[in-house]
């Protein structure tokens, strides 16, 4: 067992700067349609030149911030090689590629620091706005830029439950009946990428039910930030997500700003 690493303020600032650079790589493609070369992976999800450029930037730069392996969506490492990793970076270099292709601006970079297969720190960066979110086991959840950030907190439900879902996949389900049976009014809104988690973390929404496929790099960094803000992310049976699996696919899950909602939502 290795000691759990803690990122210093200079390391957090360096990570933000690296993600800004990766964001610039993404925007260089975003604003030049002649570079919109799009391929598809085995699961039919799209990958662009922006995904690849950002991944390469992060793979090269992250070990300079904390020297440990990097697992990126665009640079997968076989389970037989990564199963012994105690500490590693887990990266989605462009979360919301479909939003990128639809020019919605709702795409982010996700970077998590993992230890013993749990996210202990996460940072998200939105290239279009230049805004970041970060937090973890030793770091308060924050929004903005290092040196001028605001501490954020998830909010308890005091009125209608603000529920967020994906723009690009179906997400209506039994969760609505459970909330309404428990006496809650429900408002819904569609938002792209892991920005949904950040809206829970900063108090502007309450619930994100996920009923479609995701992978570990989609949830690790957002989970670290949301948990630091006081929210929760669990499977629908109430059990935590597991990381470092043979398959990187996640089960369906629900994320909430108010942990008391889990008593209503989980089976």
Image (cartoon, grey):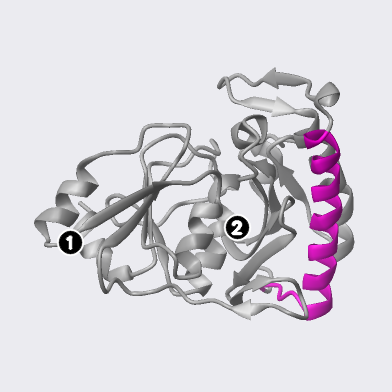
Q: Indicate the secondary structure of the residue bearing disc 1.
A: loop
User: Of the residues under marks 1 and 2, which one precedes in the sequence?
Assistant: 1
Of the pair 185 and 10, the residue shown nearer to us: 185
Instruction: State left or right for residue 125 relative to residue 244.
Output: right
Question: Where in the figure is residue 168, as x and y percent of width and height?
Answer: 48, 32
Magenta residues, dominant SS class: helix
Residue in the picture at 70% in, 27% down: 47
Residue stretch rendered in magenta on the structure:
4-31
**The N terminus lies in which quarter of the figure?**
bottom right
Q: Is residue 125 above or below residue 174?
A: below
Q: Quadrant of residue 246?
A: top right
Residue 221's disc number: 2
Question: Where in the figure is residue 41, as x and y percent of width and height?
Answer: 64, 21
Residue in the picture at 55% in, 58% down: 222
Q: Is residue 65 above or below residue 189?
A: below
Which class describes the residues within 10 Å of circle 2: few (<14), some (14-19), or many (20+)? many
Instruction: State left or right for residue 112 relative to residue 244.
Output: right
Residue 206's disc number: none
Residue 184's disc number: 1
Kindly report which numbered mark, 1 or 2, lies closer to the viewer in this rendering: 1
Spatial CA span between label 1 and label 2:
29 Å
Of the pair 262 and 200, the residue shown nearer to us: 200
Q: Indicate the secondary structure of the residue bearing disc 2.
A: helix
Q: Is residue 89 above or below residue 95?
A: below
């Amino acid at each position: 067992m290795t000691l759990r690493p803690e990122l210093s303020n200079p390391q957090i600032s360096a990570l933000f700067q690296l993600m800004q650079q990766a964001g610039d790589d993404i925007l260089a493609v975003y604003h030049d349609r002649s570079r919109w070369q799009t391929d598809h992976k085995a699961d039919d999800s799209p990958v662009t030149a922006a995904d690849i450029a950002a991944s390469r930037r992060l793979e090269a730069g992250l070990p300079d911030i904390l020297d440990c392996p990097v697992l990126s969506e665009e640079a997968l490492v076989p389970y037989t090689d990564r199963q012994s990793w105690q500490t590693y970076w887990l990266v989605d270099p462009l979360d919301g590629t479909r939003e990128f292709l639809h020019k919605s601006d709702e795409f982010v970079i996700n970077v998590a620091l993992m230890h013993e297969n749990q996210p202990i720190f996460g940072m998200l960066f939105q290239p279009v706005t230049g805004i970041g979110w970060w937090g973890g086991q030793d770091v308060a959840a924050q929004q903005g830029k290092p040196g001028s950030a605001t501490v954020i907190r998830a909010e308890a439900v005091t009125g209608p439950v603000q529920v967020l879902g994906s723009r690009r996949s179906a997400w209506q389900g039994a969760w609505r009946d459970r909330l309404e049976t428990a006496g809650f009014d429900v408002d819904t809104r569609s938002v792209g990428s892991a920005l949904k988690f950040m809206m829970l973390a900063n108090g502007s929404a309450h619930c994100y039910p996920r009923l479609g496929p995701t992978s570990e790099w989609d949830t690790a960094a957002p989970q670290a930030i949301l948990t630091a803000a006081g929210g929760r992310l669990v499977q629908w049976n109430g059990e935590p997500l597991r990381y470092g699996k043979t398959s990187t696919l996640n089960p369906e899950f629900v994320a909430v700003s108010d942990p008391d909602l889990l008593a209503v939502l989980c089976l």
